[in-house]
Amino acid sequence: MHRNLDGIHETVNYRADTEICLYYNNEYENYPTHWHNTFEIIMPVIGTYRVVCGDRDYHLREGDILIICPCMLHELFAPPTGERIIFQPGISQLNIKELNLLVAPLRPAFLITSEKYPEIHPGLQQLMMEIKEEYFSTNAYSTISVTSKFLEFLVRVGRAQTSPGSSTNAAGNAHRREYVEKFIYITDYIDNNFAENLSLEKVASLAGFSKYHFTRLFKQYTNTSFYKYLNARRIDHAKTMLMDPQLSVTEVALQSGFSSLSAFLRMFKQMTQCTPTEFRSMYGLY
């Protein structure tokens, strides 16, 4: 499996004129800590696989599916034998606001097993195999087919996250959809304004909720708190800015929305397990 690593940043080897990359990998080769701007979806087909992402160590069994979100530092460990699908779909061409809300509960990585998600696991496993077959086929419009299957994959994961144990009551479903649309707007607003001085009170007011009701609903629909979501978006932006050696760490901190260098350093360390200087060093900028 050929991967382009420049320090810890991976330039994904997309297929020509596409934003999709897929490896059917059987190599006994580990990959050091790295990150990229794409999703990475890993499914062992034969044997096991190990992934470290964030502060978690994932031991994937045959058929398990791990979704690694964009911009997350992770490390891969291969067993001596086995085969796995490693799928890297880009999202920069997908101007879909719902993605912000969908991705939030999955960060930094999300493991789907047959035991924990029996209602969606078989279908997702089948989609992964179909994506692999389509990617390596000579069919016309294979890129469109792969992209559509990836979007279907995300839809199934997103619905499982936003409607766990939901009833089939029409009024309840309508109310839930209204809230989903509300939080699609809110996460899109945060993603476009994270560098500003956003407060919980201000964003709750934009949503039309009290801060207490907003806090509860935000956690329900994103599986994280408002400030954790905001800081994650700021840190993702900071990682990209740190790749520019002309920018000082202080400039990166302020342009990413942090009010002080100390707050930025503390949050960066907390979310990436390294300092901005160490991050640059791993990337080869120092």
Image (cartoon, rainbow, N blue to C red):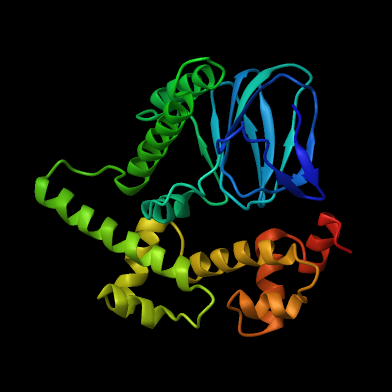
Image check: 123 left or right of 247?
A: left
The x and y percentages for residue 233 are 54, 64
Residue 131 x/y as whole percent: 49, 24
Residue 246 x/y as whole percent:
79, 72
The one nearer the camera, 179 or 185, is 185
Residue at screen point 76% across, 75% down: 249
In this picture, residue 51 sits left or right of residue 100: right
Query: Which one is in front, 208 or 91?
Result: 91
From the viewer's side, name the closer residue of 242 and 234. 242
**Is residue 198 found left or right of 29 in the rendered image?**
left
Q: Is residue 91 above or below residue 192?
A: above
Identify which residue is drawn at 41% across, 78% down: 200
Q: Quadrant of the N terminus?
A: top right
Q: How many marks?
A: 0
Q: Residue furthest right?
A: 286
User: In which quadrant is the C terminus drawn?
Assistant: bottom right
Residue beneath the point at 37% across and 82% down: 202
Residue 166: x and y, percent? 24, 44
Res. 168 image quadrant = top left
- Observer-nearest residue: 199 or 140? 140
Q: Can you tell which quarter of the image residue 267 is in?
A: bottom right
Q: Residue at x 56, y 43 (%)?
A: 39
Image height of 160 relative to 70, above or below: above
